[in-house]
Image (spheres, rainbow, N blue to C red):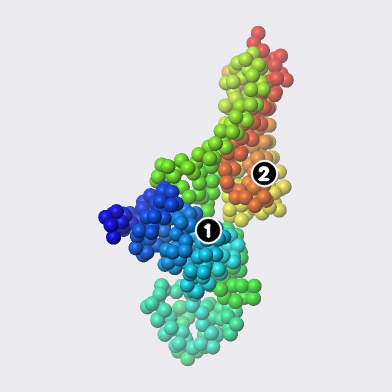
Amino acid sequence: MDAASSVILRFIDTDPQQAALALEGLSPRGAASIVRALPHEAAARLLARVHPQSEAAIYEHLVPEPAATLLGLADADDAADAFRALTDESRRVLLASLSPERRRELEERLSYPDHSVGQIMRTDVVAFSKDASVRDVVIRLKTITATKHPQSYAYVVDAQRRLLGVLNMRDLLLAEDDARVETIMRTDVVSVPAHIDREELISEPKVKGYLSIPVVDAQGRLLGAVRTSDLLESSQEEATEDLQRLFGASAEERAFSPLLFKVRQRLPWLTVNLATAFLASAVVAVFEDLIARIAVLAVFLPIVAGQGGNSGVQSLSVVLRGLIVGEVRLRDAMRLTTLEVSVGLVNGLVIGLATGVCVWLWNGNPWMGLVLGLAMVVNLVAAGFAGAVIPLGMKRLGFDPAQSSGIFLTTVTDVVGFFAFLGFAFLFQAHLLPR
């Protein structure tokens, strides 16, 4: 091993998270060359902390070897996340190079829908036949605990592996050695189908009372179990990624990601935002002559845009949260949009009245207060409408509802706000011209 690889190994051992961030900041080809130079175990530890999208980009330059070896060493869930982000051709080549066991694990996880419980469930659950004796179960549990991680629950299945019940460890300890487990198992076990959405499951109150929940197929056969901690971690990760996407940042970006990586992730959406800003400026340009004659109008433009943007973000954040935690379904779109528009109307009337009075007292012209108040009502109604329709519409079209919704929202509120304010000013200009 050369000196450079030794330094990288020390970096991985002392600060693995920073090492992963540094790797993400490189080009995929450059990162792949570093991974290739490391021992497989160290490379696998490093890649385990890299975001799946970045990890997949690195694997693209390592197919088929050492990518197959590294995927074999990775945790099954992490390997599935990275494998899912690979191109179809790379997946095909890698599948042929993997061990039969790892191939089966990945194919099984890939068969489940995105964001489903099946993608994060653990398959190494402990299950016993209903005819097994308590003595045999205890002996096997001791053996499993000595060689693997401790089990929270043990399940009871029939000959077709259909889930019958769950064993409580206290009941096992108090039962007679010769008793059959079906006589002491608890049959009121909560199970979930593998295809259920994680967000829908985590919103169920009963879920939080269990350490893990068994996962079954359509015939009730036990497939595995999903840990509540994994559900919460997955939900938190998706929520934080959605927060970043909301305003045009990448889900892969971290707080201390390298400078160039941050620039590459943010610059495309800043370019989109620039184009939308020109659209709002074009609306103002239409009324350029009016602003030249009534210069005070330019003073109030930021007020209209700012209030509309803030109101829209309030609506957008509530709708996005509802979509994330499963409170909102697409069938609720009309009812939710109507509600948000109504909220915008009421808030617009209150804020518009307060703004109009303040402008009247400050400017001395009640017509200016009327113009700004009316514009405020129109813009807050538009903000409520856009805050609901944008994420719901993106969801309906199959896109991530959080992906830069904030950029599109501010475009709507800026354009509508400027046009409403300057349009009303044009209608009432005879009362606004200085005398």
Report the residue at 54% width, 80% height from top.
Answer: 156
Q: Residue furthest bottom?
A: 178
Amino acid of disc 1: Leu
Sequence-wise first label, 2 or 1: 1
Q: Quadrant of residue 427?
A: top right
**Residue 365, position in %: x, y?**
64, 16
Q: What percent of the width, then of the height, locates residue 63?
A: 47, 61
Horizontal relation, residue 251 to residue 255: left or right: right
In the rendering, at what x and y percent does residue 98 appear? 48, 69
- The residues tagged by marks 2 and 1 sit, at their Cα atoms, a distance apart of 32 Å
239 relative position to 27: left or right: right
Q: In the rendering, at what x and y percent does residue 245 appear?
A: 54, 46
Check disc 1 and report the residue beneath it. 86
The residue carrying mark 2 is: 389
- For the question of whether residue 376 can be seen, the reply is no
Q: Nearer the viewer, residue 197 or 315?
A: 197
Q: Residues within 10 Å of mark 1 (few under 14, many from 20)?
A: many
Please state which of the two labelled residues, at mark 2 or mark 1, is closer to the viewer. 1
- In front here: 107 or 176? 107
Please identify the quadrant where the N terminus is shown. bottom left
The picture quadrant where one finds residue 58 is: bottom left
- The image shows residue 308, relative to residue 174, as above or below, that is above
Residue in the image at 47% along x and 42% along y: 264
Q: Secondary structure at mark 2?
A: helix
